[in-house]
Amino acid sequence: MKVWQGRQPTTNVEYDYSDGKREIIAIGYQTEVKVSAFLEEELLKKEAISWQERRLFVRSIKAAEREELALRSRLDKAHWALSELGQPRRGKKRLDTLEDWKEASKKILNSYRVQGLLELDYQVETQTHAIRKHGKRPARVEEKTTITLSVNVNESALEKALYLCGWRVYATNHPTATFTLNDAVVAYRENYSIERDFRRLKNAPLSLTPMYLQRDDHIKGLIRLLSLGLRVLTLLEWKVRHKLSQKNQTICGLYSGNPKRDTARPTAEKLLLAFAEINLLSIVTQGSTYLHLNPLTSLQQEILDLLDLTTDIYTQLAASNTQPP
């Protein structure tokens, strides 16, 4: 890579955290390429559309650290496995020839994905023994081959592999003047993730699986019903996060184990959990029904305000008293 060789300058990518800290989270650079593609309706005309596309090459610092730890772990495991090749084990195939050793070593390198990072040196030693004639057995010479393996790390290859850790490539046709490299990375970091919604749909809180329905129409109806719930969760979460971002504020009190912990990106599940301790008491006496609803907490009022909902949506659940029908 040109960056690794020092022939490509990079810029720092900074991110503003909810606690007010601003840190460098990545380095990167960009290039522009011309991209062409045929539209389906243009195929017969043999005409193509073209546009300028920016390729953003970004190396995340934290991703690089995680990938480096994983690579070094695989390297250590492969080194240990190679050192154990010659050790006899019950049920383990005996390696008699150099080809057997090379084949077993290749499988280990492929298994741990460290090809080219370890240098293997096979030492083959052959000893001959002269055996005298004994009875009807003629005199002969027997050979015994001993194979040992030395393993060393290819430092230059490892250095290059470590530098490749953490790199990602993004693409956009948005002009640099209004959407810088820093803006693009931050936007991708905060983008909407559909995979997370699929996890919500299949697991908690919607729990589509496991499914015990047999009829197709029931299955279709359940999926449609839960998809509506998923849309409500997604909209609720987006609304609160968008409002906090506009106000440049955070919300605290959502984490029971750490009530002072704040966040600018609360989940819908945490927001709804804040309303779990709501009790509506109904007392019927002398032909009248009296309802009592515990008052809203400051956190609950704040959430309703972020959702642009008045407290009436809550208090109207309980009038002072009602007459039975």
Image (spheres, grey):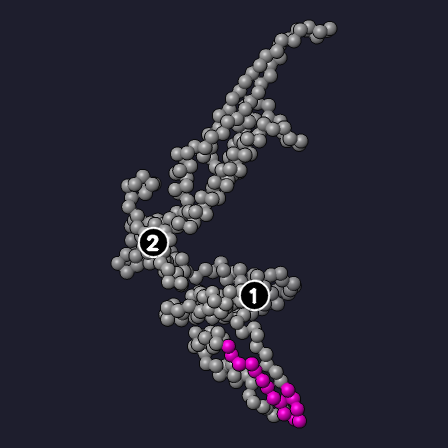
Which picture quadrant has residue 40? bottom left
**Measuring 43% from the left and 61% from the top, which residue is drawn there?**
192
Which picture quadrant has residue 287? bottom right
- For disc 2, the neighbor class at 10 Å (few under 14, some 14 to 19, many from 20) is many
- The kind of residue tagged 2 is Val
Find out whether residue 263 is within the magenta segment: no
Q: Residue 214: which disc?
A: none
Q: Secondary structure at mark 2?
A: strand
Eyeballing the image, is 18 above or below 126?
below
Q: Secondary structure at mark 1?
A: loop
Front residue (pair 74, 226): 74
**Measuring 59% from the left and 26% from the top, which residue is drawn there?**
95
- The kind of residue tagged 1 is Pro
Eyeballing the image, is 282 above or below 143?
below
- For disc 1, the neighbor class at 10 Å (few under 14, some 14 to 19, many from 20) is some
Q: Residue 13: which disc?
A: 2
Residue marked by disc 1: 205
- Marks 2 and 1 sit apart, C-alpha to C-alpha, by 35 Å
Front residue (pair 64, 143): 64
Instruction: Tell me where the magenta segment starts and ends, as one range.
Output: 283-297
Image quadrant where one finds the N terminus: top left
State the image coordinates of residue 142 (x, y, percent, origin top left): 62, 12
State the image coordinates of residue 55 (x, y, percent, origin top left): 33, 50
